[in-house]
Amino acid sequence: MKIKSLLRQYGLYPRKGLAQNFLADETVLPRIIAAAELGPEDLVLEVGPGLGFLTKELAQRARRVIAVELDRRLAALLQEKLADCPNLQVVTGDILQVDIPGLWRQAGMEPSSPGFSYKVVANLPYYITSAVLRRFLESTARPALMVLMVQKEVAQRLVAGPGQMSLLAVSVQFYARPTLVSYVPAGAFYPRPKVDSAIVRLAVDREPRYRVADSASFFRVVQAGFGQKRKQLKNALVAGLERPAQELVAALTAAGVDPQARAQNLSVEEWVRVYERMASGCSPASLTPRSI
């Protein structure tokens, strides 16, 4: 009722095209705040602040909050509703397009300076979750921590282990250590979505957790492996990389990986070993990266 009243007050309505589902159960907010472990010196970048209930909680605890909102109507509402938060900056824009380091520079901070650190808090629509994760994890200014509200099935994929791995899981776990905080039922949102959600916490290392000669080429290999998940790994890699089967079997065996395994069975460490064996026995051109 509180959300409906606020929307009516400002003449707004949820936009299906932006997958707007506002968190209506305020008992969920403390879980998000606790997972973010906020202190008075923390810098926070919030994606999709919506109606600003979580934004206000963040601003009351952190040193600085930058809230990026795609919907101009909601951005205007936030600027009016939270005008009494001097440490809050509302930015109207698409998080997939904005210059993340530039946001902090505009706030008077230099992301490349020693000791600079920030956290991300976001309620992400399913259709941009993977893209947003790549945007932050591959940025020159990676966050130290991400606390995300995502679709339940996506959360389970993020924290999956060998046997249930996916391209998304490898891409995230290459940079961060994800944990599932709690599930959030569909009834906690307005309008009610068709699926449940979950809060996940990603502890991000300042440097990638695994060292490879070229991360783009590494993900090219992983992508090829997951390109045909039902196939044995050797066959999927042959099809995806157009390399001789004998060469790939030799690389897999040398890496301690069964050539007949499926891609979802490999840990990130095993993918790194496979890539290293393949990279050491071929020219860089044969591992030309493609977008993941």
Image (cartoon, rainbow, N blue to C red):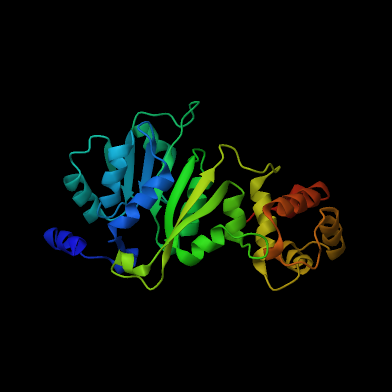
Q: Say which residue appears at 52% left-offset and 51% top-offset.
A: 134
Q: Say which residue appears at 68% left-offset and 50% top-offset.
A: 217
Is residue 10 visible to the viewer in this orientation of the structure?
A: yes
Q: Position of residue 211 (x, y in %)?
A: 68, 41
Is residue 94 visible to the viewer in this orientation of the structure?
A: no
**In front of the other: 31 or 270:** 31
In this rendering, would 4 be left or right of 124? left
Q: Position of residue 235 (x, y in %)?
A: 77, 69
In which quadrant of the rendered view does residue 264 lie? bottom right
**In front of the other: 197 or 37:** 37
Of all residues, the one furthest to the top in this rendering is 114
Q: Is residue 182 above or below residue 216?
A: below
Q: Position of residue 272 (x, y in %)?
A: 72, 50
Q: Say which residue appears at 34% left-offset and 50% top-offset.
A: 30
In which quadrant of the rendered view does residue 65 lie? top left
In this rendering, would 50 be left or right of 76? right
In this rendering, would 20 be left or right of 147? left
**Picture quarter with the C terminus:** bottom right
Of all residues, the one furthest to the left in this rendering is 9
Q: Is residue 262 above or below residue 94?
A: below
Q: Position of residue 105 (x, y in %)?
A: 38, 32
Number of marks in picture:
0
**Picture quarter with the N terminus:** bottom left
Q: Is residue 53 above or below residue 107?
A: below
